[in-house]
Structures are given as C-alpha cells and as structure tokens.
Image: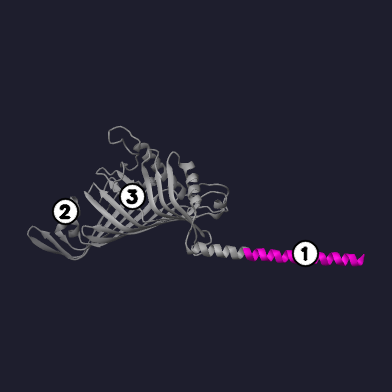
Amino acid sequence: MRRLSGQVARVCGRWLHRLVRLAVALVVAAAVAASALAWRLAQRPIDLDWLARRIEASVNTEIAPARLAIGTAGLAWEGFQQGVDRPLDLRLTRVVATGPDGAKRLDLPEVAVSVSFRALLLGRIVPRAIEIAHPAIAVRREPGGALALDLAGADAPGPAVAPGKAAGAAPGGTAGDAAPARQDEAAAVAALLDELGRPRQNDHGAGWLGRFSQLRRLRISSAAILIDDRALGAVWRIEGATIDLTRRLQGGVEGHASLSLALGGQTARLTASAALGPEGSSQVQVRLSPVDPAALAASAPVLAPLAALAAPVEGEVTAELGPRFALRHARLQLQIASGTARLGTGAVPLGPAVLIAEGDENAIT
C-alpha cells in the first residue's frame, strides 16, 4: 500500500513538472510573439482595411445622415515614449466627411489617433490624442463680421456664419440645405467645447461617458491656412502652422500656436497662447514679430496709409472671451521702433514709441 502511494506521488510529480514546463514555455512564446508584434508595429503601421471599415461604421451610426469615409487605416505602436496611457495609434489617411446634403465638410490627408486600449477591446473608438498633419484650412470674414470655416481643402469656404448666430439663407434668398448643415456643425463644435470643459476621464471611469471623454490632446501640424478677409479687402496666407491643444486634468484647455504669416511680400512670425476654462470663458494672447508697415500698404486698401510709416512695428493682443467666444475685453499694444514718417513731401524722424488701445465690443479707449 505504501509502495502504491509512492508511485502515485511520483506520477503526479512528473505531470506537475511537465505542466510547469508547458506553462513557462507558453509564457515565453507569448512574450516573444508580443515583442515581435511590438517591433513590427514600431517599424511601420500594419495596414488593416477592415479596421477602416469598422471605424466608418462606428462613427456613421452616430453622425447619420452625415457620412465619414476613410481611405486606409493602420495600427502602430508608439512604445511608452508618450506615456503608458497611449501606446496604440491608429494611422488614417484620406479622411473625408460629407454632410446630409452630400457636400464635403472635412478632408484630412493624414490623421493619427491614439486610442483607449480597453475601449478598443470592446469595439469602441475612444480617442485620447488626435494629430492632424498637412490640413488645408480656408477662413472667410465678411464685411459685417460673419465667419466661414472650411476644412475640406477648398479655397472658398461655404456660407458665412455671423458671430453667435446660425447660418443664414441660401444664396437664392431662401433657406437652403446649407443653413441646417451649418447649424449642425455649430452644435457639434459647441458640444465638443462643453466636453473639453469637463474633467478628462480614463479607462478606470464608470461606463461609457462619450466618445471624447478621454481626449487629452489635439495637435495640428504643417497646416496651410488661407484667410480671405473681405472686411479689409486682403487675403492672408499661412504656411506650416502648428496648433497644439492640451486638456487639463480637471477640465478646460490650454493651447499654443505658431505660424508664419505672409504679409505684403514679407513674412511675420505669429505666436499665440490660449486658455479655455471649465466654465467656457477663455483668455487669448497673440504676439506678432517686427514687421515693416510700409510693406503692408499694398496688401489691402485699408492699410494704404501705412505707406507713410517706415519703422519696424511689433504687437501684442490680449483678449478675455466669454462663453462661445463672445468678446468681454481686449487690449492692443504696439511697439514702434525708430524710423521715419512721411508727411507731405518731407520725412519726420520717429523715436521709439508705444501705442496702447483697449476696450470691449462697445467702446475702445
């Protein structure tokens, strides 16, 4: 009996040893496979056509009757250089969105989206960071102040929208399909701003809190921007613009922008910073590098009087904005270096000077 018990123990011991060896082998194999996959993803994205179609289906169920189309989709691994919360990136190309009327609303050549891994396992696309490369953006300002924005890569934006108002009637004088489309776009932007004003979430939060609940960063790089300022009668072109928005832990956004602005044959460097508070108010600061006012005179009729001034000028604008970017207060400071001012047939030397103006939408002092 004692001999039988010893045999059973030896058999069990051998099987346990084999199971341990098998478990170790499986762990090593899984580690090698994971390392190989990580290395492959780090080299270049893996093209996954089915993933593009899956993203389209997921987004289109939410934005119908608008439509989203994606050219290609790939999966890449960033390692942990951007933090442990964003190792996986979706690399998308030719991202095009059309409105209910079939008109193109968005055309982005390259988009990289870092996603929540947990949500991805559940079949959801929850972005944590979005980077848009090489977009073409067109902006138009009407004489009355109405604004139109086009992200579809066109040189001429669609119907303009007055500040704080929805789009007006169609060109024929009656309300067309453009008006409700622009209202939908305005509502989408307002909803996104409201979301960014809330504290950011993570995978440990409770349940589904919205597609952008975990969004932490939005970056636009190498953007080409065309500004058709019909109030000034000028067209401004910006190349290589970079815009970086970061969401705070407790809600609100901090933003920075850097761009080169072509002004009348010269290039000025413009930098901006902004802070959007959780309650919707914001502060903006814009700085312009020194420019020659005389060189700007030919860029717009309203700037023609600047031809008389030959002195470098640099400036700074600060503004406090309320919800939906309604102006509360603004301050402009111009620093004029030594130069000359042409008066009649003569020229008057100028010393360094500072010009300050401030006010709100009702008065300037």
* Residue 111's disc number: none
The residue tagged 3 is 153
Q: Relative to 246, does residue 211 appear above or below in the rendering?
A: above
Counting from the top left corner in percent of width and height, residue 102 is at: 38, 40
- For the N terminus, which image quadrant? bottom right
**Which quadrant of the view contains residue 342?**
bottom left
| Marked residue nearer the N-terminal end (2 or 1) | 1
| Number of residue marks | 3
Nearer to me, 344 or 204:
204
Q: What kind of element bears circle 1?
A: helix
Mark 1 or 3, which is nearer the eye? 1
Q: Earlier in the sequence, mark 2 or mark 3?
A: 3
Q: Nearer the viewer, residue 264 or 294?
A: 264
Q: Amino acid at mark 3?
A: Gly
The residue that label 2 is drawn on is 304
Callout 2 secondary element: helix
Residue assigned mark 1: 15
Residue 3 location, x and y as percent? Answer: 90, 67
Q: CA distance from mark 1 to mark 3?
A: 67 Å
Q: Specify the quadrant of the image occupied by residue 172.
A: top left
**Percent from the top left, x then y, of residue 212?**
48, 49
Indicate whether residue 24 is drawn in magenta.
yes
- Which amino acid does the dot numbered 2 rest on? Ala
> Which type of secondary structure does the marked residue at label 3 adopt?
loop
Q: Which residues are magenta?
A: 1-29
